[in-house]
Image (cartoon, rainbow, N blue to C red):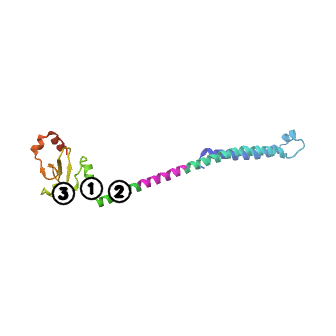
Amino acid sequence: MKNKIGKLLRIIGIIVFILGLLGGVLAATNKAFIFFLHPGSGFVWSIALTIWFEAFIFGMIFIGLAEVIKLLELQNKDNIRIEDKNTKISDELSRLRNDMNNNFATLAEYLNPSEISNKDNNEKNNNLINIDNENFEKISKQFTSNLIKRITYTPFQDIYMIIEKNKKYLIYYTGVDATPIDEGSINKNQELKAWFQKQ
């Protein structure tokens, strides 16, 4: 038993048993003591049994307390073991949940890669929102460049931003024709210029 108090109580209980046993024998055979209580007797069983009984009661109290402490210690260990097991289960569930989310994301990317790619790009580039695939195709056909990666909305009506590998530029698009916006026109609109410079 690791608990020092419980161990000490158990030792005290055993010592009480031993002292009670010896005390009962000595008291029951002590001539002066016997003569005073039971003149003419040799070994007085009533004296021995009384002392032994009292020693047994007190010894059992100490041993009983030691057992209670031992049981509490075992219960505490069981609680710690259960908490550890619950923590491991919780960690395993979290890992499985993350694996499931990753698998669903991979499946979604496999089924619709352009949508996932657009979502990732939006998060990386100031949360810019890509236009839909239909308009993307319409605008792309009007430009000879094959370097167009994204076409995004801007905060300005009918103005969109084309993102290529090494440059960005603005266009005016109403659903039919797409017209590039030159630098002079951008400079005339201070709000548009400030927004574009931040991109």
Q: Amino acid at mark 2?
A: Asn
Which picture quadrant has residue 139?
bottom left
Identify the residue at the far right of this view.
40
Magenta stretch bounds: 79-95
Given residues 68 and 196, the one toward you in this image is 196
**Image-based side of 160 in relation to 82, left or right:** left
Residue drawn 35% across the image and 58% down it = 104
The crowd level at tag 2 (other Cα within 10 Å; few <14, some 14-19, many 20+) is few
The crowd level at tag 1 (other Cα within 10 Å; few <14, some 14-19, many 20+) is some
The verdict on residue 60 being magenta is no
Residue under label 2, please give it. Answer: 102
Q: Is residue 165 above or below residue 194?
A: below
The crowd level at tag 3 (other Cα within 10 Å; few <14, some 14-19, many 20+) is few
Residue under label 3, please give it. Answer: 137
Q: Position of residue 26 (x, y in %)?
A: 80, 44
Q: Residue 115, which numbered label?
A: 1
Q: Give me the C-alpha separation between circle 1 and circle 2.
A: 16 Å
